[in-house]
Image (cartoon, grey):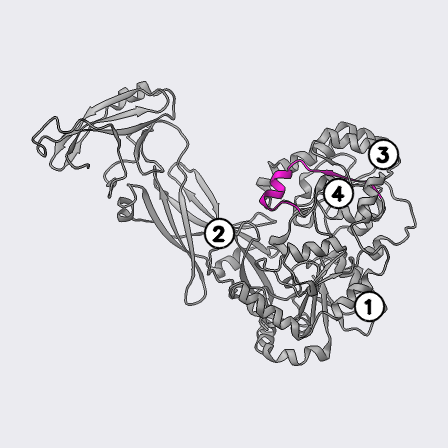
Amino acid sequence: MRQGYRVSEVSAVLRETGAEVRAQAVPDGDQYAVVLPLDQLRHLAARTGDVADLWMHLTPDQRETQDATASAPRDPVRLGKFTTTEREAAATSTTGSRERVVVTQKGNLSLSFGEQTRRKFQVTVGERRSAGSVPIYDIEVRCGDRPAVDVRVVAVARESEGRYLFHGTLVHLPEEGRADQGRWVQSVSITVDLEDLAARIDDRVELLDLYVEVEDADGRVQTSRIKSQPGDREVAWGPVSLGGDVLQVVPHTTFRGGNRSLRVERMGADVYRAIRRWSRLARWLPLVRPILGIWLVGELPYKAQDNGYHLFRWIRQSHPRRRAYYVIDGDAPDLRRLEGLGNVVLRNSREHVRVAFLASRLVGTHHAEYLLPSRDPRTIAGARGVRVFLRHGISGTKNMVANYGRFAPGFSTDRFHVSSDREREVAIKEFGYRPAQVRVTGLPRFDQLLAPSDRPPSGILVIPTWREWLVHRDSFETSAYRDQWQAFLSHPQLAELMRGGLRVTFILHPNMRHFADMFHAPGVQILKQGEVDVQTLLRDHAALITDYSSVAFDFALQRRPVAYFQFDQEKFFGPHGTHLDLEQELPGPIVNDVDTLVDEVRHTAGTGFAVRSEYADRAARLVRYHDRRNCERVAASVRSAGGPVVQWWRLQDRRRAGGDHASDPAP
C-alpha cells in the first residue's frame, strides 16, 4: 500500500462495455474486506467471456497526515502485484457459475465471466538421471486462473502415432504461488520407466517425440514439446533386456526446433556386447585402420538407390579388391538391388559392428551416424573413421546450414562434396567449411542418370519435399500441404489430361512416406519411398513438378521441363532463407496456386514436354562436369580424405564449438 493512503473502494470495470461497479472497502485491521455485487456485474457483462478488471481507489489516510488538503485522492490503481497474494481459501470459480478469479500476465487480479479462452499453463521442464541412469523429468506448472489436475509425459511414435504415457504425483506449491502474485504453482517428477516402455512399445518404432500434456478440471489438455536444454546429456538410456534382445534409448535434439526426441535401438544381446567390447578397444584401432583400408558406405538404413548405392556399385565393379562394404536393413526392399555385388553387411549385425569400428572411411549421403550400429555417443566416439559426406542432392534451394554446416549440432564431416564451383563457394562461405575439405566432383548418381535410355520418357512425376513441422498424422491431415497437393492431384483439368493419356506419378519425400495413404486421386499412381527407385522415376518421366526438392536439379540436367509449386514459400524458408535467387536461378517456373500449376502442366504437355532455352541454360550451370565420371572423381576424393590433418581439424572444431560437438569423434 502506498504510504499515506488508504483503500476507500474497489471497482470492477468491464473490458467490453466499460461499465463500472464499485464496492466500499471496509477496514479490518491492516486489511480490507470488499464484497462485489456479482449479479449486477453479470447483468452488465456484454457477452459470455467478458472480463472485469479490478481497481483500488485510494484516498489520503487522515491518521497519517494532519493536513487533509496536503494530498489529493490518487488515480485508481490496479489490484495486484503484491509481494504475496493469498488465494488458497478462495474458490477458483463461484459455486454454480463460471466466474473465476484470474491473475493476468502482469500479475493483476481480474474477474472472468462465463466461457472464455483459458490462460495457458506456463510449463518448465528439467531432465536428470537417477543413479541407474533412468531419466526423470522435473516439471513445474504455473497458471493465473486455474490449477492443473494432471500432468504427464507422453512419448509419441513419429510414424505409427502410438502414445506411451508416464505419470507422477502432482504437488501444489502454495508458497511459490503467494510469491508469484497468487498464481497456481504445481510441480511433478515423472520417471520414464524404460522396462515399462520396452514392454509396451511396438517393435517397428524407432523414433519417439516427447511432449508434456497438462490437463485441467474441464478436461482441456494443453500440449507442448519438451525442449532440450544446455547441458542435457545424450548418453543412451538403458539397456533393457527383452528375451534375447536388448533395447536402449538414445536422446537427441531436433535440428531446428531444439526439441527432445528419442531414438529406440533394438539389437541382439550378442550385438550389444560386441559394441561394448569394440568400444573398449577403440583407442587402439587407429593403428590398424590405415592398414585394413575398410570403407563403410550407406544411405538411410532402408535405402540403396542414391549416391551411396551408385558409388558402392561402381567400386565393386571397377575396383573389386577395395574393401568397401554397404550397410542396409535386413528387411529393406532395396536389399535386392545389392545382390551379386558382395560385401553387404546387415544393419545391427555383429559383422556391422566389426566393420563400423574398423572402417577408415564412413561414406554416407546423410549423417555418418546412420552407418553405425548405435547412435550412443560412446559408439560414435569409438567409430573414428574419416567422415565423408556424399550429399543427397545439389544444395541451394533451401538454406541447410542448420542441418549440414560445419558447426551444425549433431552433424560432422571431414570431406564435403559438391557439384559446381558456385556450390563450393556456398559450402566455404556459408556452411563454414575449410577450402581443403570441399571437393567439386559431381554426384555419383549422375553417372546413371545421364546414361542413354532404351525408351523415351513419358508423363509427369510429382515429388514434393518434406516439412519439418509436419511429423504427426493429425497435423498433416489438416495442413495446407496436404490440401494444396490433394487439390492439384484431384483437379478436374488434370483428370481431363489423364483421360487423354497423360501419366501422373506422385511420391512423397522419405520423411513423409508414412502419409502416402492420405492422398487419393483416381488415375494418379501414388507410390511410397522404397517401392521403386527414384532414379528410375526421374529417367522414365518427361516432366517434373516439385516445390523445393533438389531432385529438380537432377531432372533438369536431362534437359527436361521442371515446374515449382511454392504455395508456402515464406513459412518454408523462414528466417534462414535460400542460397539462390529463385526467380533467376531455378531451372523452371515458380507458381503458387493450383490453377496456375494446372495451366503450366497443360502448356508443357502441349509443347511435347520441350524445355525452354532459358531454363536449359540455368540447368547447365548447376554442375561443373557434364560427363559420366562422377563416381570416379568421388572415389578418388574419398581415398585422399584422410591423414593427420583430419585429427587437427577435429580438435580445432571441438574447441571452437565449446567442447560440446556431440557427434564429432574424439581424435
Nearest the camera: 14 or 638? 638
Magenta includes 240?
Answer: no
Query: Badge 2 local density, few (<14 within 10 Å), some, or many (20+)?
Result: many
For the residues labelled 3 and 2, say whether their Cβ atoms are less than 8 Å apart.
no
Q: Report whether residue 69 is seen.
A: yes
Q: Which residue is mark 1?
A: 316
Q: Amino acid at mark 4?
A: Leu
Magenta-drawn segment: 560-578
Give residue 227's mark.
2
Q: Amino acid at mark 2?
A: Lys
- Tell me the residue that label 4 is attached to: 586
The amino acid beneath tag 3 is Ala
Local crowd size for mark 3, using a 10 Å CA cut-off: few (<14), some (14–19), many (≥20) = some
**Gap between marks 3 and 2 measured at Cα:** 48 Å
| Outermost residue, right side | 454
Question: Which residue is the site of mark 3?
Answer: 605
Q: Could you say whether the residue bearing mark 4 is in a helix, strand or loop? A: loop
545 versus 557 height, above or below: above
Between the C-alphas of marks 4 and 1, the distance is: 36 Å
| Residue at the image point whose x is 12% and y is 34% from the top | 28
Distance of label 2 from label 1 (alpha carbons): 44 Å
Q: Please determine whether, in this image, residue 619 is positioned above or below residue 33.
A: below
Secondary structure beneath disc 3?
helix
